[in-house]
């Protein structure tokens, strides 16, 4: 049950208050949003429609594309609306809902990345046992588990934040509702909320990050000592490098925003970093993970030919 508070709505102050920049930023972020929908949507269609891509690797990539579409949709439409509106309000319930789905999808994606790294580890280091270890049932169970875990992780933050008392300012210095900006507006003691944000979210981020690094560390060690083919080594290292780029883009900003909660970082810095992981990274994921992949390109051409 939501807290009975004197604040019934919040005002999102957004990225900038310079009026002349609002239409320009609207077009920039609208273009980014369409690129996100087009790139990740194309991957989803290809992975679902082409039987040749019905493998664990592309199953998880399909999950990633779905997450990226939903992740940006949680914040970008409201952000675009506010660029063209003078009334930048969001209801209390809408704010808590946005917070919940942002953390739900973000934490789910953070857990999906190490699962994808583990899939690559098994494919490269245990090729003879790959189909047994990464069976369809196991992959489905992994996906369901991380989606459910992400939902309950977000539910913890949304419930705890909704029970805070907001009796003062209702102006959020951000372009979406997040835990940290809301804690700055809350009246009373927020130590428990801050502890949960530091420790629970921190554990999710750090755990996922180190599990991902561990998988790629074993892959690189295996390739250097077991692989005698230079072409295979180069291909595998290239794949690992591109995947590691996604890891840095995803976890780097998260560490800065959530792990450094007690530090004096400015809201302007935090907004720029939030744009990186909530807006830019979902657009880059299709380019880094799949649209550079020859199999995906061939499957995409097959789908286009069938549509024509």
Image (cartoon, helix red, strand yellow):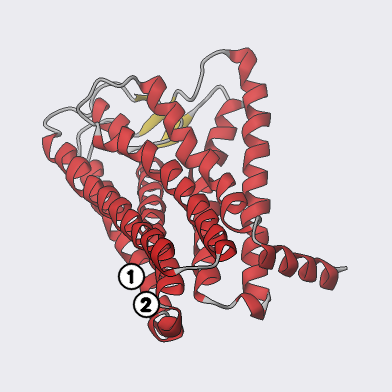
Per the image, the residue denoted by label 1 is 145
Q: Count neighbours of disc 2 (C-alpha within 10 A) and say few if under 14, some if 14 to 19, many if 20 or more.
A: few
Mark linked to residue 266: none
Name the secondary structure under disc 2: helix
> Which residue is rendered at x = 60% and y = 53% of the image?
286
Q: Is residue 108 left or right of residue 4?
A: right
Whether residue 59 is situated above or below residue 187 in the rendered picture: below
Q: Nearer the viewer, residue 294 or 36?
A: 294
Check whether the beta carbons of the residues at disc 1 and disc 2 lie within 8 A of each other.
yes
Residue 25, by quadrant, is: top right
The image shows residue 264, relative to residue 109, as above or below, that is: above
- Identify the residue shown where x is 38% and y is 30%: 10
- Taking depth in this image into account, of 92 and 117 the one nearest to the observer is 117
- Residue 173 visible to the viewer: no
| 13 in relation to 261, above or below | above
How dense is the environment of label 1, judged by Cα within 10 Å: few (below 14), some, or many (20 and up)? Answer: some
Give coordinates of residue 96: x percent, y percent. 34, 44
Q: Residue at x 55, y 58 (%)?
A: 234
Residue at disc 1, secondary structure = helix
Residue 88 location (% of width, % of height):
50, 27
Q: Quadrant of residue 52?
A: bottom right
* Residue 187 visible: yes
Q: Residue at x 68, y 52 (%)?
A: 38
Q: Which residue is mark 2?
A: 141
């Amino acid at each position: 049950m939501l807290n009975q508070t004197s604040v019934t709505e919040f005002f999102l102050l957004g990225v900038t208050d310079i009026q002349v920049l609002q239409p320009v930023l609207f077009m920039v972020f609208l273009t980014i949003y369409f690129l996100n929908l087009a790139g990740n949507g194309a991957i989803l269609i290809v992975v679902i429609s082409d039987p040749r891509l019905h493998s664990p690797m592309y199953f998880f990539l399909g999950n990633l594309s779905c997450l990226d579409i939903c992740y940006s949709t949680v914040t970008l439409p409201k952000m675009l609306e506010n660029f063209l509106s003078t009334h930048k309000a969001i209801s209390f319930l809408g704010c808590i809902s946005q917070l919940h789905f942002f953390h739900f999808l973000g934490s789910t994606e953070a857990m999906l990345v190490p699962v994808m790294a583990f899939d690559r580890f098994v494919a490269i280091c245990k090729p003879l046992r790959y189909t047994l270890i990464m069976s369809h049932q196991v992959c489905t169970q992994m996906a369901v588990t991380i989606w459910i875990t992400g939902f309950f992780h977000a539910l913890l933050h949304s419930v705890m934040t909704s029970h805070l008392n907001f009796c003062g300012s209702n102006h959020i210095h951000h372009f979406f509702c997040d835990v940290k900006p809301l804690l700055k507006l809350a009246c009373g003691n927020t130590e428990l909320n801050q502890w949960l944000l530091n420790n629970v979210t921190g554990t999710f981020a750090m755990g996922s990050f180190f599990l991902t690094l561990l998988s790629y560390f074993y892959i690189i060690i295996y390739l250097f000592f077991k692989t005698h083919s230079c072409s295979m080594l180069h291909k595998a290292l290239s794949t690992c490098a591109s995947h590691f780029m996604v890891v840095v883009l995803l976890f780097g900003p998260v560490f800065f925003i959530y792990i450094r909660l007690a530090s004096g970082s400015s809201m302007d810095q935090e907004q720029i970093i939030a744009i990186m992981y909530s807006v830019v990274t979902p657009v880059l994921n299709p380019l880094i993970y799949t649209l550079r992949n020859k199999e995906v390109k061939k499957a995409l051409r097959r789908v286009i030919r069938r549509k024509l």
